[in-house]
Image (cartoon, rainbow, N blue to C red):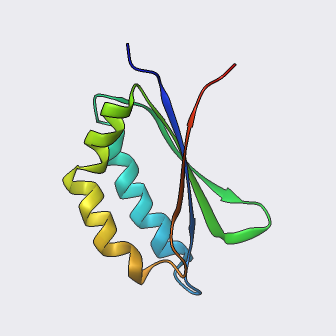
Amino acid sequence: MSQQVTVIATLHARPGQEAALEARMRIMIEATRKEAGCIRYDMHRAADDPASLIMVEYWTSAEALQQHDDSSHMAALGRDLPDLVDRPVEVRKFSQVA
């Protein structure tokens, strides 16, 4: 049986692109939440930096996450993000230990 995977992705909007980045991520949320292996896919804004968003993702397995990474909506996001963010997206993967 595969182990659940948690992903924390940090995105930082270019100056003036905060609303556009949030809107683009809302489109991503809608598509991703329909994926079979998606348990949760939520967006949060930093209290101390309105340009900073994190995506908190829970996946049933590494295989489900890989299918997400290979999806057409993820490819489209990859094409759109360079215009919206001012630094590379940081993606960290975790497995539950307790």
Q: Quadrant of the N terminus?
A: top left
Task: Indicate left or right for 50 with 7 as reference.
Answer: right
Residue extending farthest to the right is: 48
Residue 8, given in percent of the width and then of the height, sits at 57, 48
For image coordinates 39% across by 73% down, the residue present is 81
Residue 51, given in percent of the width and then of the height, sits at 64, 73
Residue extending farthest to the left is: 72
Of residues 17 and 74, which is closer to you in this image?
Answer: 74
Task: Indicate left or right for 66 with 95 as reference.
Answer: left
Against 57, is 51 above or below? Answer: below
Of residues 12 and 27, which is closer to you in this image?
Answer: 12
Task: Indicate left or right for 8 with 81 as reference.
Answer: right
Quarter holding residue 52: bottom right
Residue 86, given in percent of the width and then of the height, sits at 54, 82
Of residues 79 and 18, which is closer to you in this image?
Answer: 79
Q: Quadrant of the C terminus?
A: top right
Against 61, is 14 above or below? Answer: below
Q: How many marks?
A: 0
Against 85, is 92 above or below? Answer: above
Quarter holding residue 60: top left
Residue extending farthest to the bottom is: 15
Residue 93, given in percent of the width and then of the height, sits at 53, 43
For image coordinates 42% across by 56% down, the residue present is 26
For image coordinates 80% across by 66% down, the residue present is 48
